[in-house]
Each structure stands twice: as structure tokens, then as C-alpha cells.
Amino acid sequence: MYIKQVGLMNQAPTLKVKSRLSSFNQLSRIHPFMILFAEQKNMKESVIEIDGGTSLPLFSLNTLIIGSGAAALNAASNLHKMGKEDIAVVTDEWGGGTSNNAGSDKQTYYKLSLSGDLPDSSLEMAKDLFKGGSMHGDIALCEAQNSAQAFFHLVSLGVPFPHDRYGKYAGYKTDHDPRGRATSAGPLTSHLMFECLAKDIKSRGIKVFDMHEVIGLLTEAKDNEKHVIGAIALDKNNLDSSNYGFVVFNAVNVILATGGPGGIYKASVYPESQLGSSGLAFEIGAIANNLTESQYGLASVKFRWNLSGTYQQVIPRYVSADREGRGEREFLNDYFPDMGKLATAIFLKGYQWPFDPRKVANYGSSLIDILVYQETVKKERRVFLDFTRNPSGGGVLEDFTFDQLNEEAHTYLEKSGALLSTPIDRLRKMNEPAIDLYKRHGIDISKDYLEIAVCAQHNNGGLKGDIWWESNIKHLFPVGEVNGTHGVYRQGGAALNSGQVGSMRAALYISERYNDDPRDGKSFMNSANAQIKKKFEFVQRIIDPRIEEDSFIRSTRSEIQERMSACCAHIRELERVRKAITEAWRLYSRLKKEMKVTSPQALPAAFKNLDLCLTHALYLEASREYLEKGGKSRGSYLVLDSEGEKPCKELGEEWKFCLNERDAFVDKKILEVYLNEKLEVEKQWVDIRPIPQEETWFENVWSEYRKGNIIK
Ligand SMILES: Cc1cc2nc3c(=O)[nH]c(=O)nc-3n(C[C@H](O)[C@H](O)[C@H](O)COP(=O)(O)OP(=O)(O)OC[C@H]3O[C@@H](n4cnc5c(N)ncnc54)[C@H](O)[C@@H]3O)c2cc1C
């Protein structure tokens, strides 16, 4: 044990560090789950005292992994496999997040083709990833090259990806995929990945800090660079204690696997438990790229689920009603010239799920997303899918019959034996589990309407990383969806692949290059103390028992989400984004200065609001920069433009837009956004790195490998 006095009054505050080995009996009280992970080796627990004698637990370890989704758990699994035992996972909710809770009709995993007679190679796959636009070529190559290894890691852990009796992992074509590289373990692929990875983590005895909300990353400056050195979390089971549940981590490396920013949107198909924590990294100056690029599409809102695949291929009826459910009408009828085009557009939505401005014209499938948005956001009505009846023309169009469908749709239904009388009969025939899924969540779509909206689903952009997924903040590795490796378009399933490849490569780099022991508590606290103290004082300041309820938290959360869904989701317009930015920064400064909560129980929500507020401000900033540089509609959003064209004559004048011209500036560069030391927003357009064409002559690679020159 040692005690050190530092500084004088008004300089660095008093600091005490008492060392002792971790007491896991104490930890097992926190959550039953902890008992399972009590075997941890190496990690040290100490107690630090900040000003005024408040004690906080300090855990010192090599690598802290934040999050418990598929990317986080894969990082932990790989690190352990590579011999790094001095690691821990910290998560706000074990079992929360997208991986464990989201899925779709057939949730897709993208990897090198491993079957069939279409030849494939990592270079070909990299080229296809790269073609999505605004994606760096070296990252595309890494994701392609390592996809098979990451995939077989999951297979070895028991994820039931289907194969035939020769061991051939059959593939199918997903969007933007010419070679049938996609596979799926069913509607719950990412959940199965979570389950198998979690089992592996458990069997390896890796420590998990459950119910710990990370509220800040700790940094220090070294050689003109910023390094992450740890994190602060709130133990949600200990908020009412005198230290408000503060837990401090002293880590050589931090793997940030906090997922996508689901919490910034009102209309969202991210699971409710997935709010995101990108603000943690923005706050310390981590650079983000491609923040403008997300995917939006139709989803149910009561129980959040993607309405892709068979849900659309069975051609349900789309109806809207007022807030009270009155005045029901089949609103799509007013915008399509005949039932054949309308029913075919609904059918195609099945595999053209994300909204895509290129698929609006000629009564394309994405016209439906626009019409649903118009109904729900502009007219403030509610929209539902009705599986019990076929679309009817309502006197405007003819009623639905199969012979009106285009050949592709008709053949598909015919081959599936699904030329049956109602959408629910067709769904029962083609995909009965799709009906059961809703039943399990209290919605019987064989009788009831299903409420829908155009929802945010995935962020292609996010934090920037290098080919080892290390960010510009040294020793900070954003992996999974929080890391924005993709550009404008991505193949279905590429998100899950990216999360597995990135977390595996981060683990490899750490185990080879950053595998030092954590530094001693005293030296750590010299750098971290002021940062911890600042957060602690903020907490002391915002708790005010005189406040009657936490309505401020609820109203500010809604304000953020409504602003993003209205101005910066799949429909965007420069003037509205500009206005939204002013409002966003105003709210952020109010939160920092005026936010109050009734009790420590509300602290995690308060910090989450700060995080989401900063996050949405930066997303809006990126959008403004893109629009001011002349960016038009692309990816999964439409930019309203009075000088553009109406995609169909039935839509109002306000729906004019155009796509980016060939060789548009915004398509030739990648937009990076970050906060500088003065917390001002910096934006830079960087060149897109091409796919590396390095020589792979075996003898030379072997020689470099033996010299240890590869991982650096
Ligand atoms: C409906 C839907 C369908 C999808 N379908 C596909 C598909 O078919 N193919 C595909 O490739 N991708 C798909 N995706 C995307 C893919 O599922 C996600 O990108 C992926 O699961 C994200 O994994 P992750 O590990 O990065 O994050 P997540 O699984 O979201 O995990 C994030 C973790 O971080 C934790 N966390 C967050 N903040 C904190 C904090 N401050 N402190 C502590 N812990 C924190 C959360 O609790 C959670 O455990 C889909 C997404 C959705 C929503």
C-alpha cells in the first residue's frame, strides 16, 4: 500500500492509492452473473480516494472491452485465445445491444464465397466492398481477406451456419453482391453469434462487469499524440452509495464496441436497449468518418423488427389512419398508376429493403418509404400493414390479382406454392416463423394490424480506424458498428463481418504490440485524477433532490430523437439541417449547464443524454458539410432539391430531388469530423485510399513475417 500527497491547494488534489488484490467475493454480490466470472487472473483491484476522501474502486488491466455485443465478445474471445488473460468486458447490460436483440427475415452474414462454382478471391471481394463508395481500399481488403477466418471462428464456436454433407457452406446473393457470398443462420444470426461467443467468454473465465455504464474515457497526451488510458463507469447497482457507483479502469488499451447510435432517432429499429455511446469517443477527439451514411427502411414500431423479405413478398395491404385510428385509407393508391405496379413495388421491398433514392423513380420500391414518411411525419397519421386482406384499389385502382404482378414476383410466389388467397396465408406457407415471432411479442398479425414507420437501422459510418482498427487516439480500438468502415452502400451482411474482422484484428495487434502490464496506480492517477474529479463534481452538481421528477431527461431525449428523425434521417434538406444544428448545440450547452436529476438513479440516463446530444450534433454537422459541398441524394437518404426532378407526377413539388452527378466531389472523398482540443468542430475531406496492390511473393512475405515486420 502507498499513499501519496500531490500538490497544494488549487493545484492537483489530494490523491491516495491503496493496493490490494481483487476481492471477487465482493463483486459476486453485484450480479449473479459475476459468480461465473470470478476466476479472473491478473487484473488488480485497488481503491483510490479523490478529494474529500471519497473512495472509488480502481481496476488495472491490459485491455478493457466496452460492450457485450458480437464485436466486443469476439474481441475478448480472440484476445484470450492469443494469450491475453488480463482483460475484462464492461457492459451496461449483459444481453443488451443490437447483436443479441435484432434480426430480420433472414439475417445475413457476408464473407468470401465458400461454395458453388463462381470463382472468388479476397481481392474480388475487396473490390466489391470498395465499390460501395467512400470506403478505404485497405480496410476493404482487410475485411475481405479476414472474412473466412472470422466466419470459421464463429463456426468453431457453434454458430449453426448451414452446410451440406460435403461441408459446403452454401451461399446466396445479397444486395450489391455478384457472387453469392451471403449466408445466414436464420432470422436471429447475430443473436446466435452472441450466444456462442458468450458461452466461449464464460468458459474462458473472462471477467464481465455487468450493469456498468461507461461515462467517460480517460486520456493523456504523449509525444504530440493523445492516448487513451482507461475509463470511468457507473455501477448501476451501486448508484446510491457515497461514491455514486463510480468505478475507474486503468487500462493499456480500450476496445470500444458500443454499437451504433440507435438512441439518436425517434423512428428506429435498433433494439430499445441499443442507444450507442459514440459521444464517449467524440468527447476525447476521436475522428469519425462517413457519419452521413446510415441505412433506413420499413420496420414495425411496437415491437421493433425489420419488415424485409417475406413480410413484403406476400404483398400486405398498406393502410393509414389518424392518431385515434379513424379515417382508414389505402394511401398508396393515390400515387401508383395501377395495381400491378403498386403490388410489384411492395413485393420488391422484400429484397430492396433499405431506402434507396435510386429506386424511387418509375414507381420503384423506395417510393413506398417516401409515402410512409409523408403519411407518418408530414401528415402525422399512423401507417399499418394488414396481412389479413389483399390490397384493394378503393375505386382508384383495380383490386389486387396475381396476374397484375411482374414476372419476377409472380414466378417467385408460384414457385413457392404461395399463390394463395390472402397475405397471411402466403406468409404462413412461405415463412410461418415470421408470424410466430410477432406472436411471441404479443402481436397477432393473422388478426391485427402492424404499425410501421421508416426507421434507422444501421450506421455505415462511425469512428475512424486504421487497418488494425486503432483510432487516431492511440490504444483506442473502435470495433463493430461504432467503427464506420463502410461507405455509401454496403452488402447485406457486411456489418456483421466487419465487426468480427475488426475485433479480431484489434486483438491481434494488442496481443503483439500493446501487451504491456498496466502502469501502477500512482502514475495512472497523475494523469487521470483531474478527469475523474471533473466527472465526479459534475455528478455532485446535477443531483438535486428538490427536483420532483426527471421529466427534463425524457423531454431532452425526445427532442434529440425527433430532431434527427425529422431532419437527418432518410429525408434531408440543407436549411432544416442548419437550423437543427443551432438547436442541437444549444441543447448540449443547456445539458452541461442546467441539467438536474432527482437522484443518483437517474445518472446513467443523464450521461446518456449528454452522449446522444453530442453525437447527434456531430451527425448533423457532417450532414451540413456534405450538403454545403453540393452533396445530393445517395446511399439511403434523399436530399430535397427544388432544382431536381419529381420522381413521379403524383408526388407534390416538394419532393424534387436528384442523385449525385458522376465524379461529384463528395463521392471522391471521405468526410471526417471531430472535435479539436477547444471542442470546436473540425471537418476534413480526405482522399479515398485505394485497394493496396502489394506483392505477395511467398518467400518475401515469409521473411518479413519472421522478422516481425507485419504487425506494426
Ligand atoms: C433490425 C436489424 C437488422 C440487422 N440485420 C443485419 C444483417 O442482416 N446483416 C448485418 O451484417 N447486419 C445487420 N444489422 C446490423 C448488425 O446487427 C449490427 O451492426 C451489429 O450487431 C452490431 O454489433 P456490435 O457488437 O457492434 O454492437 P451491439 O451488438 O449493438 O452491442 C453494443 C454493446 O455496447 C453496450 N454499450 C453501449 N454503450 C455502453 C456504455 N456506455 N457502457 C457500457 N456498455 C455499453 C451495449 O449494451 C451492447 O452490449 C442489423 C441491425 C438491425 C437493427
Image: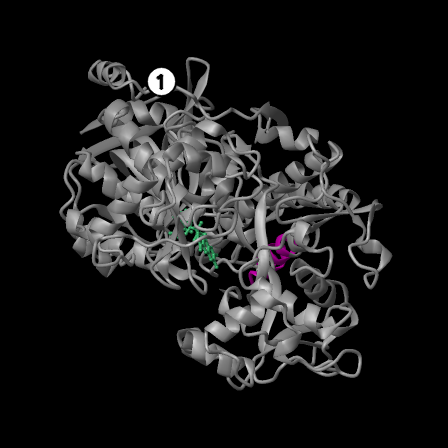
Q: Can residue 375 be seen in this view?
A: yes
What segment is highlighted magenta in the picture? 549-561
Q: Is residue 329 left or right of residue 419?
A: right
* Residue for point 25% across, 19% down: 698
Is 385 within the magenta?
no
- Identify the residue position indicated by label 1 in the image: 695
Q: Can residue 681 be seen in this view?
A: no
| Quadrant assignment, res 438 | bottom left
Residue 650: x and y, percent? 82, 64
**Quarter of the C terminus within the rendering:** top left
**Quarter of the N terminus within the rendering:** top left
Is 560 within the magenta?
yes
Asked if 555 appears above or below 77 in the picture, the reply is below
- The one of 463 and 27 positioned closer to us in this rendering: 463
Q: Which amino acid does label 1 sit on?
A: Glu
- The one of 259 and 92 positioned closer to us in this rendering: 259
Q: Is residue 519 left or right of residue 269?
A: left
The kind of secondary structure the magenta stretch mainly shows is helix
Asked if 137 appears above or below 242 in the picture, the reply is above
Residue 547: x and y, percent? 57, 59
* Residue for point 77% across, 78% down: 397
Residue 646: x and y, percent? 81, 53
- The one of 182 and 104 positioned closer to us in this rendering: 182
Residue 349: x and y, percent? 59, 63
Say few, some or many: other residues with alpha carbon within 10 Å of mark 1 (under 14 / 14 to 19 / 20 or more).
few
* Residue for point 33% across, 45% down: 72
Judged from the image, the secondary structure of the residue bearing numbered disc 1 is loop
Task: Count all numbered tags in the image, as a single digit.
Answer: 1
| Quadrant assignment, res 89 | top left
* Residue for point 67% across, 32% down: 666
